[in-house]
Every structure is written in structure tokens, then in C-alpha cells.
Image (cartoon, helix red, strand yellow):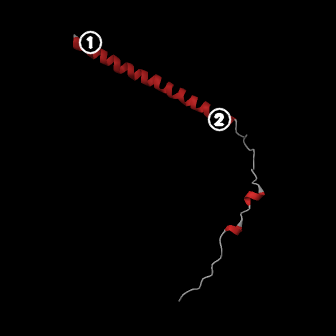
Amino acid sequence: MVILNFILIVLIIVYGSRILVRFVLPWLIKRKFEKMQGQYNQRTENTRTEGEVHINNKDSHTSKKNHKDVGEYVEYEEVD
């Protein structure tokens, strides 16, 4: 009789966990996905609208490079 009770309890636990996994796990995954999607949407709301173009112009004095500091020219001769 003890063995039957043990087998019955094990079967209830196994099938009960299968039912919980089948219904609860997808619900938890869906809930987590929706939460992550909501956080992403909140971050992207503050950005520019679609199709908007924004150009950052660099200052003219910073974009020109000073070629005087490149180095000095050294003459060389080819040796045959």
C-alpha cells in the first residue's frame, strides 16, 4: 500500500509539473517579453521621428588640419 501511495504521489507531481510548465512558463516568457518591449519603446520615444534628418556641422577651425606639423622633408639618394 505504501508503494502505491508513493507511485501515486510521484505521478501527481510529474503530471502537475508538466501542466504548470505547459501553461505557466509561456505566460512568464510572454510577460517578460512585453516588459522588455515596453522598456525599449520608452527609450526610443525620445529619439527623433522617422524621416527627420539632423546634420551636425563641425566647426571650421577644428575640421581643418594643420599640415605644418606633419614633419620635415628628408632628401635621400638611391644606392645602386
Furthest toward the bottom, the residue is: 80
Do tag 2 and tag 1 residues touch (Cβ < 8 Å)?
Answer: no
Q: Nearer the viewer, residue 53 or 67?
A: 67
Instruction: Give the quadrant of residue 38.
Output: top right
Judge from the rendering whether residue 26 lies leftward or rightward of residue 56; answer left or right: left
Element at label 2: helix
Query: Which residue is rendered at x = 66% and y = 37% of the image?
Result: 44
Neighbourhood count class around disc 2 (C-alpha, 10 Å): few under 14, some 14–19, many 20 upward: few
Q: Give amino acid for label 1.
A: Asn
- In the image, residue 67 above or below residue 43: below
Element at label 1: helix
> Residue 62: where, in percent of width, then height?
73, 57
Which residue is under mark 2? Answer: 43
Query: Which residue is rendered at x = 63% and y = 81% of the image?
Result: 75
Query: Quick one: label 2 or label 1, which is nearer the N terminus?
Result: 1
Instruction: Give the quadrant of residue 20.
Output: top left
Q: Nearer the viewer, residue 65 or 37?
A: 65
Which residue is under mark 1? Answer: 5
Furthest toward the top, the residue is: 1
Furthest toward the right, the residue is: 60
Neighbourhood count class around disc 1 (C-alpha, 10 Å): few under 14, some 14–19, many 20 upward: few
- The alpha-carbon separation of the residues under discs 2 and 1 comes to 55 Å
Q: Nearer the viewer, residue 8 or 73?
A: 73
Judge from the rendering whether residue 6 lies leftward or rightward of residue 64; answer left or right: left
Instruction: Classify the position of the N terminus by image quarter.
Output: top left
- In the image, residue 7 above or below residue 59: above
- In the image, residue 8 above or below residue 51: above
Judge from the rendering whether residue 7 lies leftward or rightward of residue 26; answer left or right: left
Query: Which residue is rendered at x = 26% and y = 15% of the image?
Result: 6
> Residue 50: where, in percent of width, then height?
72, 42
Query: Which residue is rendered at x = 49% and y = 27% of the image?
Result: 26
Mark number, residue 17: none
